[in-house]
Amino acid sequence: MTPLNRFEIHQPATITEASRMLLEHGEEGGCYAGGTELLLALRHRALQYQHLVDIKVIPGLNSIQAANDWIDIGAACTHRDIERSPLIREKLPVVAEMESHVANVRVRASGTIGGNLCFAEPHSDPATLLLALEAVVRTEGESGARELRVDELINGAYSNSLEPGELLTSIHIPVLLPVQRAAYVKYQIRERPALGLAVVLDTPDGGATISQARIAIGCLCPFPRRSAAAEEMLRGSREEVEALIPQAAEVLADDAELIDDNEGAADYKRHLLGVFLRRAVARALDGA
Amino acid sequence: MKRPGDFRIVNHSVPRADGVAKVTGRAMYTSDIELDGMTWAKVLRSPFAHARIVSIDTAAARQSPGVLDVITGTDLASLRPYYGHAVKDHPILAIDKVRFIGEPVAAVVAEDDLSAEEALQLIEVEYEELPSVMEVDASLAPEAPLIHDEAYTEGAFRGFKDGRQASGNVCQYVKVKWGDAAAAFASAAHVVENEFHFPMAYAYAMEAYVAIADYSKKGLTVYSSAQHPFMVRHDLADIFDLPLNAVRMIIPYVGGGYGSKSYTKIEPIAAVCSWRTGRPVKLRLSIDEAFLTTRGDDARVRIRTACDAEGKFLARQATIHLNTGAYAENSPLVCAKAANRIIGPYLIPNVDIDCYAVYTNTVPASSYRGFGSTQVTFPAESQNEELADLIGVDPFEFRMRNLAQRGEVIYPGLRPIDADVPGDLRQIESKFEEWGAVQEGRGRAVGCSASDAGSHPVTSAMIHVYSDGSVSVLSGATEIGQGSHTVLAQIAAEEMGVPMSKVRVVGGDTAITPFERSTGASRTTTLMGRAVLEACREAIAQLMSFAAEALGVAQSALIEECGGVRHGDTQWSWGEVIEKHFKHKDTSIIGRAYLRQTGDLKLMPPFWEIGVVGTEISVDQETGKIRLERLMTVGDVGLAINPAAAEGQDLGAATMGIGVGLFEELIYDGQQLTNGSLLEYRVPRFSDLAPDIHMTLAQNQDGSGPYGAKGGGEGSLNPIPACLANALYRATGARVRRLPLTPERVWRALQERPKV
Ligand SMILES: Cc1cc2nc3c(=O)[nH]c(=O)nc-3n(C[C@H](O)[C@H](O)[C@H](O)COP(=O)(O)OP(=O)(O)OC[C@H]3O[C@@H](n4cnc5c(N)ncnc54)[C@H](O)[C@@H]3O)c2cc1C
């Protein structure tokens, strides 16, 4: 086994202290949450931190809170915390369901949602669903707190828009309105998903018509994205929407800049987008 | 011969001797061992597929804290730095040039692994890149660069057939021919011809390679995860020119092999590190490095089969190209096996097979569970099914018309078939009947294979029988997870008439255990099991004469009983006989047995390993994803010494077949291996197992092993990929001739299907 390089662990008591530590160590330091990505990257010398700031010891960073119309998930919550949270299961079952299929139980037990989003690995399940749910991520740093959309936080493959010393602190998710139905579907052969697709559909009449649609795709593109043009196509009666699914999928595929790689050739991924868009809409509307 | 029902311990699923230690984490593996003064080695690997080494600057690495030595190929001139049991083409560390990305170029020895790793980063190597060949066709092209320009010597155990037939980049060539195939094809009623591709696969084992070497004036001791300690001993003795008794291989528990741990791997590197530093050295690879150490041969098979109007085979012709990678390793053997295992358990009167193992600038290929059979059963059984369809005969019926009956010879000069293969197939057939009609969208298929298994029958065993009635079995076979230590103890307990708790298997130490050629080719139960049985019988023969002497009667007056001897009212256990013989407590006697290629083991192979499986799959026609719904295996093992262990082997083997059948494939993009890690290389998971699994054992006591036992453990892998492909055809009408059957590949085949 390749040994890790030498490093020092720092355990801050507050977010402010964590932020200060990160600033102090600059390029040589980084946040350490569950370590599931970090340790692999350090082992492969893709990251070369000499100082790890262990943020999961910060009190409160792993709390889950809810009000009537939103849920707040602390950045240091593990996938397992979220999957098993009664609050989330009740108020946002689509999130709990998605989380229960992230990675494997070992990764879910230590990997955090914050680490998932900040690492911006292209094959993220949460990022795609959170984008469709119009979640907002909250950050804190030297220059104060910010709120960002998921596609503002993740601005490229393995790239985020956090400033030096800035931490992701929580994810704020509006709960679905009574007229909204959501579904997340994914396609996976290997260790990480090859395609993730989330839909949030507004249907005032129990599924007969769709007044508004949000669609987010991930994994087959460098970072998750939505397409206004495709969303526009999924408005109308259910029949109309279903008839336009293939075209909407084409639009999504055009947007995704699909490439041939070990996960499949671009034409296959294009085809899969059609299959899974249909399955996602059906699951959202029929719960199947 | 004892029959099932007559046994006390054999043929019972007794608990594994190593089970508790393994599941509680107390079992010792090489990784767990720490020697006094032990240091660590790390290996610098080549970033080029083919390059000349211009210079290596180790000065900075030597200055790095904790570093004891930095060793490169040029430091090995006083040794015999090339090894290989088949072809001595493998340098311990690259000499003058590198032949694949990942080849060891230098080793750092340091006080701890991190210091070694840090120093690696300070070694400067200057390379001059050479043109590389990554695939068989490129390697065989007339203008292809030569990967090995030196004339290597043959290894001691299986060299170039008839001298180096091999020329250019051909590592080994094997021809199998009988009858007149050309004439048979010319007049055949039906002929099918196709090309098939078997992927480059990695025999993933949970434990990566690890070795600890301790070289001193007294000799060399190596702890290792090796599967064939005596073969590794040979290479090490040769490298250092040491007598056999000065090289001691100790093999603790091994965390799986599946072919990847056979023959010499990293032991020579650890050994030269210790030789240079005079300190014990541990070298432990990561799984990512294991991916760069060995793999299975990928194969392209052009195959043509003819049958008559009744569906009887007339001829088979095939040209097999194996991509053997940068070094021969065990591929000359895989080459020979692929050439003859493409026949299957069938009678084919005219055969003409050419098999080439071809060097390329990729990770060296070696043994992979099934040894060549996996690669060729896929084309053979796919094509058999195509022929059956062509003439409109049911797949079972087609096979029945062609299967060899017990005692028939499928391969001239080899042992006649020692199994009832048609009977095995009938078991699958009746299970299929029980399952009823196949649901829409699903497909069902049967498949079979025959492998000349067992390898050279050169096996010795020794037992100590103690005066307190306990027994030790000294066996050179490696407990690699297959359960051999349990099975061998069962045989000794059965023969010596003692409970399992009184038997201990001492294994894995070449200074203590007698010679065993290898732990592979499914041989251990058959050959080591038989040697243990014979050693017990030899001990009992001595004990009978000792008892006669002690009683002052003729041996013929004694009655041998379970666990001892009786004469009139006098009843002595074997322990009592020993104590009376020596008139001393705590004494013991030695029973021994040697197996050679003589008597009933004269004809090769020692036994045929039969694989007979049935599968049912469902297919997501939109994504192309296949799911195995039902699996049945028939383990034709003669007699299962431990039925649960035998079934475990069948399930494991079949699961490996699911891996290579559905997902496993090492992918090169140009010179670079793109998925050499477990995150990228998909091995089977529990969730991939069929929800409905039936494992049966055929126990006809028709093998050359103890009580008529024969080996298992590979058979149930070999036909699985073909079975999946044939089931896919049944389900969808799509025929895929390239493994693995990835969803994308299946989806494309579904698109290209002739429209009905
Ligand atoms: C085998 C495997 C399979 C996986 N499969 C899936 C899958 O199917 N679907 C999926 O979505 N994901 C998958 N993942 C990714 C997994 O979800 C992430 O590894 C995990 O969530 C990362 O969290 P962590 O706490 O371990 O992050 P760490 O490894 O600790 O950190 C990751 C990165 O984020 C930074 N970071 C962490 N927290 C913060 C913060 N609060 N603020 C700022 N920066 C921060 C770290 O500095 C580091 O650069 C898989 C991972 C593995 C190893």
Image (cartoon, coloured by chain):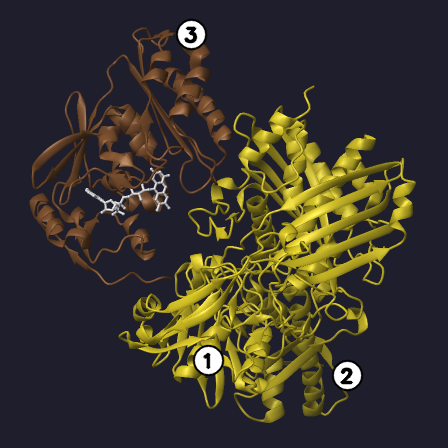
Chain colours: A brown, B yellow
Residue B686 place in picture, x, y as percent = 48, 44
* Real-space CA distance between mark 2 and mark 3, rounded to the nearest whole angstrom: 98 Å
Q: Judge whether residue B562 can be spotted in this image.
A: no
Describe residue B173's horizontal placement relative to residue B681 as left or right.
right
Residue B106 appears in the rendering: yes
Establish whether labels 2 and 3 are both on one chain: no
Vertical order, B621 against B742 (above or below)? above
Q: Is residue A122 above or below residue B449?
A: above
Q: Dot 3 surroundings within 10 Å: few (below 14), some, or many (20 or more)?
A: some
Q: Is residue B626 left or right of residue A26?
A: right
Q: Are marks 1 and 3 on the same chain?
A: no
Q: Nearer the viewer, mark 2 or mark 1?
A: 1
Q: Name which residue lies at 73% across and 45% down.
A: B302
Mark 1 is on which residue type? Answer: Asp
Ligand 1's quadrant: top left
Side (left or right) of B525 relative to B36 = right
Above or below, B751 against B511 in this view is: above
Instruction: Provide the residue designation for mark 1.
Output: B75
> What kind of residue is marked 2?
Ala
Q: Chain of mark 2?
A: B
Which residue is denoted by mark 2 in the rendering?
B557
Q: Secondary structure at mark 1?
A: helix
Secondary structure beneath label 3: helix
User: Looking at the image, is A177 positioned above or below residue B754?
Assistant: above
Query: Numbered disc 1: what chain?
Result: B
Asked if disc 2 and disc 1 are in contact, CB closer than 8 Å, the reply is no
Q: Is mark 3 within 8 Å of ligand 1?
A: no
Inspect the image, locate mark 3, and give the three-letter code of the amino acid beneath it: Glu
Q: Nearer the viewer, mark 2 or mark 3?
A: 3
Where is residue B495? Give x, y as percent: 65, 71
Name the chain letter of the residue that bears numbered label 3.
Answer: A
Residue wearing tag 3: A240
